[in-house]
Image (cartoon, rainbow, N blue to C red):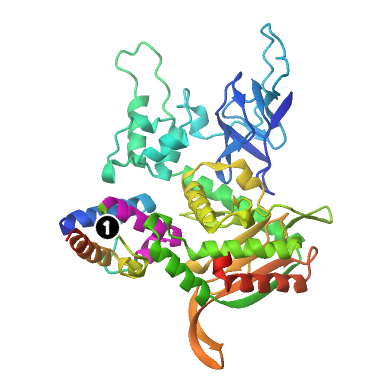
Amino acid sequence: MTEAEIREAVLTVLSDIAPEADLGRLKPQARLRDQLDIDSMDFLNFVIGLHRALHVEIPERDYGRLATLSGCIEYLASAACQQKA
Amino acid sequence: MSEFLMPKLGADMTAGTLVAWRKKPGESVRRGDIMAEVDTDKGVIDIEAFTDGVVETLLAEPGANVPVGMPLARIRAAGEEAIAATPAPAAPLPPAVAQTTSAAAAVPGLPPALSMDELSRLRISPSARQRARELGVDPRLIEGTGRGGAITREDIERAATSRAAPPPPAASPPIPAPTPKTSAEGPERNRRMRQAIAAAMSRANREIPHYYLSTTIELKPALDWLAKQNEQRPITERLLYGVLLLKATAMALREVPELNAFWREDRLFPQTSIHLGVAVSLRGGGLIAPALHDADKKSLDELMRELRDLVARVRSGGLRSSELADPTITVTSLGEQGVEAVYGVIYPPQVALVGFGKVVERPWCAGGQIVPRPVITATLAGDHRATDGHRGGVFLAAVDRLLQEPENL
């Protein structure tokens, strides 16, 4: 899976959770929680959405690595690689 | 024969606008079935039947603004004779007290209400869904242009415009296009919700002599237990720590039942069921605190499932009348926004509000040592007419004690 595909999947899941947000304006390095007014229930739904879209296991201890858009892409790319292997 | 009345969904509600009937005359209903959708300042709510029977007559038409307590329909109990075999003169519709000005009411041929099932299969945002309702557009017939094929507000508006354009063979009179209120509904909804919150909170501050208590609770045992649990669970079955707080609150209320009560006409009415009103903030402002029913009797898994479902429905529609009408106490958790403690305003006629702040790591004394520990500040706003600070203190101590043994929650 390419980085662009992962990015697209992340944005699609986010658009379900924050439908009113302009995701084109997301700053890749800033925390999603602050930019999108996401609470813990939203975040859990985000993780579930990523799991369903990309078929990766995401243990709770790794949640911190999903805090930003660029963090998500980096983490999911390596997780998808490892879990396929 | 019983009457199906416009329910009172909260202390401040005086009337609601009928959006759609979900049952037809002649159809049988069971207690708890959804009879109608009613627009209130808390959004469009599914109104449940409170009795078994057969729908005899519908007494109001979609679009009518009906005061609380006025009959909306007649329901014939099982076994009861139908009123008349011959076509009786149709019961006169009560004059709509005030026609709503919303576009939805003015559009002829509003699409049939969608079932939750259909809605959940559609990729459509809550605001687009709301827009579809206003404009009388059936979202099932629209091809979404949003991300992943999602239907956007613009898709809905485009569909409404193209449909309202006069048909090429102008034989039938063109349907007047609903005046597109591009941004009126959002702010309008927001304004009404603010007014409802203002009315309830002003009354609370005017009438309820609040007292406030606060305590710091060590959360390491609870969070450690939770982390272990979640490690073994698939993503979809993981628990949030908020669910532990809710269960501990519900169990502690059994020990101090006078906090789980209503204050009406200078008297305390303790409630036997514990229905936690969970404050859920809405994206774009406002909040709703619908009930998690019988929270003390449910497992953490059940509570988690119901909380997820409730939060989803607060944000995208489909709340039920019973969920709005009967919370016996409210729990608010502002920790998500980063504050350490919240001192709430009680929602009348309830007599208490429990608040949880943010989980923070702080120096903590344990066994003569100072150690870093995750802690949370729990607060209680109590109605001093109903209870005294002493009993409030007993309650918060019970919440603390219960959270130290998470495996028993």
Q: Chain of mark 1?
A: A
A48 drawn magenta:
yes
The residue that appears at 62% across and 30% down in the rendered structure is: B30
- The residue beneath circle 1 is A56
The picture quadrant where one finds residue B406 is bottom right
B334 drawn magenta:
no
The residue that appears at 34% across and 24% down in the rendered structure is: B165
- The residue range painted magenta reads A32-53
The picture quadrant where one finds residue B340 is bottom right
Q: Quadrant of the C terminus of chain B?
A: bottom right
Q: Residue furthest right?
A: B266
The x and y percentages for residue B260 are 72, 58
> In the image, B306: left or right of B250?
left
* B382, A75: nearer the viewer: A75
Residue type at the position of mark 1: Val
Q: Residue furthest bottom?
A: B368
Q: Quadrant of the N terminus of chain B?
A: top right
